[in-house]
Amino acid sequence: MSKKYILKKNIIDGYNGIMDLDLTNIPKLYHHEMIQLHNKDIEIYKIEQLLLPEKLRFENTVQRAYNTIKTDREALVKNKNKYSIS
């Protein structure tokens, strides 16, 4: 008989340039404080982004590159399927 293991996610979403917060191996005693700090970091990040010139903001640099890569990959898959021999 096999045991079923349920993975409990302790991941708090990040925001654009801020990575997710993984609380998996952190004692529960510190979770509340770490989540507050994480949210504060996100708020500071948003303010910093607003202070940057528009062309240097995350959504116009890194996010734009991610979108271009995603579009290119989708086109490659579409063309591969179009020209593949079955």
Image (spheres, rainbow, N blue to C red):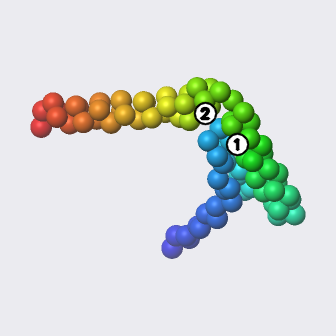
Who's the residue at 73% across and 47% down the image?
Answer: 42
Q: Which residue is labeled 2 in the image? A: 58
How many numbered discs? 2
Outermost residue, bottom side: 1
Outermost residue, left side: 86
- 44, 12: nearer the viewer: 44
The type of residue carrying mark 1 is Lys
Who's the residue at 41% across and 35% down the image?
Answer: 70
Depicted 30 relative to depicted 41: above or below: below
| Residue 32 locus on image (x, y percent) | 82, 62
42 on left or right of 8: right
Res. 81 image quadrant = top left
Depicted 18 relative to depicted 26: above or below: above
What's the distance in space between the residues labelled 2 and 1, CA to CA? Answer: 10 Å
29 on left or right of 75: right
Dot 2 or dot 1: first in sequence order is 1
Who's the residue at 69% across and 36% down the image?
Answer: 49
The label number, if any, that marks residue 6 in the structure image: none
Q: Which residue is labeled 1 in the image? A: 46
| Residue 16 locus on image (x, y percent) | 62, 41
Res. 31 image quadrant = bottom right
- 86, 39: nearer the viewer: 39
Tag 1: Cα neighbours inside 10 Å, few (<14), some, or many (≥20)? some
The type of residue carrying mark 2 is Phe
